Amino acid sequence: MTSLDELPLRADLRGLTPYGAPQAPLPVALNVNENTHPVPDAVVGDILDDIALALTDVNRYPDREFTALREAFAGYLGHGLTADQIWAGNGSNEVLQHIMQAFAGPGRTAFGFAPTYSMYPLITQGTGARWISGTREDDYTITAEDAAAQVRDADPDVILLCSPNNPTGTPLGLDVVEAVYEAARGIVIVDEAYHEFAPKDAASALSLLPGRPRLAVSRTMSKAFAFAGARVGYLAADPAFIDALRLVRLPYHLSALTQAAATAALRNSATMLRMVDEIVEQRDRITATLEALGYTPHASWSNFVLFGGVDDPRAVWQALYDRGVLIRDVGIPGHLRVTAGTEAETTAFLDALASIGSSS
Ligand SMILES: *Cc1c(COP(=O)(O)O)cnc(C)c1O
């Protein structure tokens, strides 16, 4: 067996660990913030019709500019956006990678306020850039003044603001985005992967795009849209920003089948997003029940809850696993993270946790 050390790997990749959330076939999987409700049957039929149509042309390369899909995303996002302000990729991870390839890379830096999404440092390092971690308050919030000061100090080429933040669920005010943009010379990305789970009147950073050509707002169909397996993420930014991403994407990166499926799903967005209210209800139920059990859940505007007061996270994680419930140890001492599932899945998690009863 050859070991990795024996291969002529890039020096800056030596010793790194790949992304590795466990994929265990447990009855209740609440570990990677998927929408656990399947795509509604009526929409499945519509998507299949469009995929069938796309298959009749699959001997040809797909539309490299995925025009119909970009128009559909512009329509879904609103805010007066047009297709020339939209980009998409195979998951927002690929979109973020395109941004890093275009604006980070060797000799450059990317910055985020830790703890934040674990893929940011990995995508950064994958392009040969260096990751810089900023800090948050004890409750994981960030003030505009402190954020701007940290950004001025680090002077990064790319800044990633996760709103609401994963893995903590913490909302991020637009005042922070504005202050960071003013303080930065580099690109500012607001990752709104969980925006649909925020209160209905929560402002999106999309409203800040006019006049800010270094700002991009990324979204995904993996969470609210129940489309994680299809791999579709997207962003909105200035048309010049989109042109920069065209320099680094592989030609025809979005397959004809992906484009067809995503466009059909967006045509049915009202039905696709039907379960969001139910998931938010389960999230709030998790928070209330965790409090009653003596844990300390953090405020969440997403579809998951990070909770503290766990004496031995590894042991609790394993005890839940042994009861058929998969949640996430995100490496924050004394904490675990759980995704809000269906009512039945959420009940299974809460009952299992209560039966372990090991909160400090
Ligand atoms: C889940 C998640 C994404 C989405 O990733 P995809 O590649 O679109 O599945 C992006 N950002 C954050 C913070 C996430 O939690």
Image (tube, helix red, strand yellow):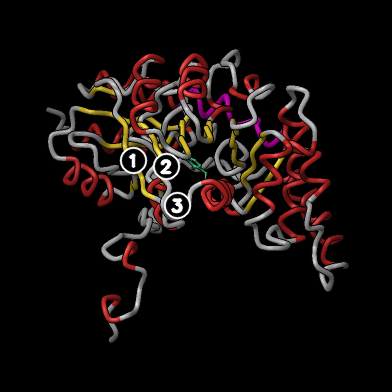
Question: Quick one: label 2 or label 3, which is nearer the N terminus?
Answer: 2
Residue with the mark numbered 3: 123
Residue 90 among magenta residues: no
Q: Which residue, given by chain and number where applicable, does mark 2 sit on?
A: 110
Residue 353: image location, x then y, percent: 25, 35
Pick whichever, 159 or 275, lies toward us: 159
Report crowding for label 2: few under 14, some 14 to 19, many 20 or more residues within 10 A (C-alpha).
many
Residue under label 1: 132
Image quarter of the C terminus: top left
The circle on residue 155 is none
Q: Are marks 1 and 2 in contact (CB under 8 Å)?
A: yes
Nearer to us in this view, 96 or 300: 96
Identify the magenta region.
270-282
Residue shown at 82% from the left, 66% from the top:
55
Q: Three-letter amino acid code at disc 2?
A: Ala
State whether residue 102 is above or below residue 225: below
Badge 1 amino acid: Ile
Instruction: Verify whether residue 277 appears in magenta.
Output: yes
Q: Residue at x 26, y 45 (%)?
A: 320
* Image vertical order of residue 238 relative to residue 88, above or below: above
Q: Secondary structure at mark 2?
A: strand
> Which residue is pictured at 28% across the width and 86% down the height?
1
